[in-house]
Image (cartoon, rainbow, N blue to C red):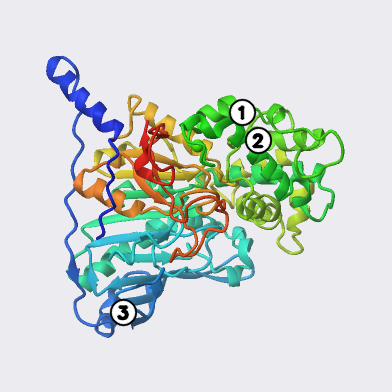
Amino acid sequence: MRTPLRLAVVPRALILSVAMVALLAACSTTPVRSKLPQLSEAKSAMLAGTCEELTPKLSVLPNTKITSVKSVAAGEIKIGGNAVAEHCLVVGSMYDRTGEPEATPYAIGFEMRLPKNWNGRFWYQGNGGIDGSVQPALGNLGGGPVTNALLQGFAVISSDAGHDNRKTRGPGFGLDPQARLDYGYQAVGKLTPMAKELIRIAYGKGPDRSYIGGCSNGGRHALVAAARYPEMYDGFLVGSPGFNLPKAAVANIFGAQQYKKVATDPKDLSTAFTKQERQAVVNAVLAKCDALDGATDGMIQDTDACEAKFNFMRDVPTCTGERNGTCLSEAQKKAIAPIFSGASTSDGKPFYASFPVDAGLAGPGVANWEFVASLNLDSGAVGLIFGVPPQNPKGFDGPNFTLTGNIDAMLASIYAKNAIFKESAMEFMTPPNATDMSRVKAMGGKILVYHGVSDPIFSVNDTEAWYNGTQAANGGDASDFARFFRVPGMDHCRDGAATDQFDVISSLVQWVEQGQAPDWIMARARGAGNPGGRNEDLPANWSADRTRPLCPYPGVATYKGSGSIEDASSFVCK
Ligand SMILES: [Ca+2]
């Protein structure tokens, strides 16, 4: 396993902990925090025999159908120029059945990739969106190839979470109550014991350490698993989590209805808030907030100070004449401000988090989520997968549902249940008692969360509120088992004006297995020449491989006052 680069940044937490030790030594009555269990390090092993020899042994797996087992040679797959080592690819399904509507075939489809030379660890790859297809079990996370579980030697599983979008026409699976529950949480609960047993058969021992991680809906899967299945995993990697996904989807529909009020072309919501205009907002917020962290570098590290200082209505230039891309009209401001301040019901009650105004707002990812996904994805999710009762999928018109639907009714539908749909969407999609992670903590498990500040679909402020609640549930400090890293400028899971490439998997493994809590995480921009693909949103005046420390909340990467602003070593977490 690669070791993350360490820099000569003096972690503030270390200084504090030294001071605290001195204080504790001087004052014997100070309560000493009980020590959490330290889990042992995973030990590597070799696959027992060939992939072909594995096939007959897997027939013992209950409720499981193995479709194929084949060998993948070293280098057959390359990730960011790195050759993936030799491994077995196992493809199969669990709980094959028929369901709604009209005897649709269902199963929990999966693939597992088992490295010949295994690091002793299991990785459950949570996938994005509404699931529904088995993404390759490579364990990719974040921008670029830095974080990749398969490259690092994990045995990795990936699944469709219980439905095949080709057979259900995407969100049509929402008509099947069991398919909703599998998508929400039960697929993880069913696949995990099977996967561990399959690993035991393949290597002669089960995984020493198990991890679950993903971004977006995959981050949701990880946080839901931490709440529902804490005993199944040792580490939870929670990227840009949609852990309040049904509410976030209604909030994005709320946003589309706001944009519709000022769109000059009713068929194209992006005419409500063009790229030039979004850049004008970015310029305005940078003018107020960029220097708050000590470096005028196009990044707003001090999100909280910026939110206190920047006022959308006041600080964005108001057009005195026609819209010309450098300003927003009064009507635009009135329509768009409530999207940032937080979606609300018809009587003004907020139902989802606010969004920070941040430097990554001008990117195309933002436009896609706000102006396109709201019509084509959130509509189907709310109307067919989350709402009780679901809409009729025959003739369901997503854009019309989004642009003309009643927000209050949509919100009520994601909390509703009936005799057929016995759990509401807010029950099956979200972590129960989300801020109670006591079982993870007690077992020595660790939760590492990251979230882009410019994420337009799941708000970093929602994740911040969850983390603050988790802190409060642990006497004001949960940092001994749960840490939260904001990624300034990053769009949803990657891209944006951001350093969006970071090896959070290694950070989590070191924390779980070595007890080394991440006081900061190295993050790198993906400029020209990056093997993982260039981030097109990077400002032209940034170095192609700018680095920054990601800081544990509420820490802020702060410029030391000297040294290159392109280099993480010039910053310290404060
Ligand atoms: Ca700055």
Q: Which quarter of the figure is the N terminus placed in?
A: bottom left
Q: Residues within 10 Å of mark 1 (few under 14, many from 20)?
A: some
Q: Residue at x 68, y 33 (%)?
A: 344
Q: Is residue 28 visible?
A: no
Name the disc covering residue 74, or none: 3
Q: Viewer-nearest of labels 1 and 2? A: 2
Relative to 165, residue 478 above or below: above
Three-letter amino acid code at disc 2? Ala
Q: Residues within 10 Å of mark 3 (few under 14, many from 20)?
A: some
**On the image, numbered disc 2 is attached to which residue?**
284
Quarter where residue 316 is shown: top right
Q: Residue at x 24, y 84 (%)?
A: 53
Three-letter amino acid code at disc 1? Phe
**On the image, numbered disc 1 is attached to which residue?**
310
Q: Nearer the viewer, residue 547 or 433?
A: 547
Given contact means CB atoms under 8 Å apart, are the residues at marks 1 and 3 in contact? Answer: no
Given contact means CB atoms under 8 Å apart, are the residues at marks 1 and 2 in contact? Answer: yes
Q: Is residue 312 visible?
A: yes
Compute the Cα span from label 1 to label 2: 9 Å
Q: Secondary structure at mark 1?
A: loop
Name the disc covering residue 46, or none: none
In the image: residue 147, left or right of residue 428:
left
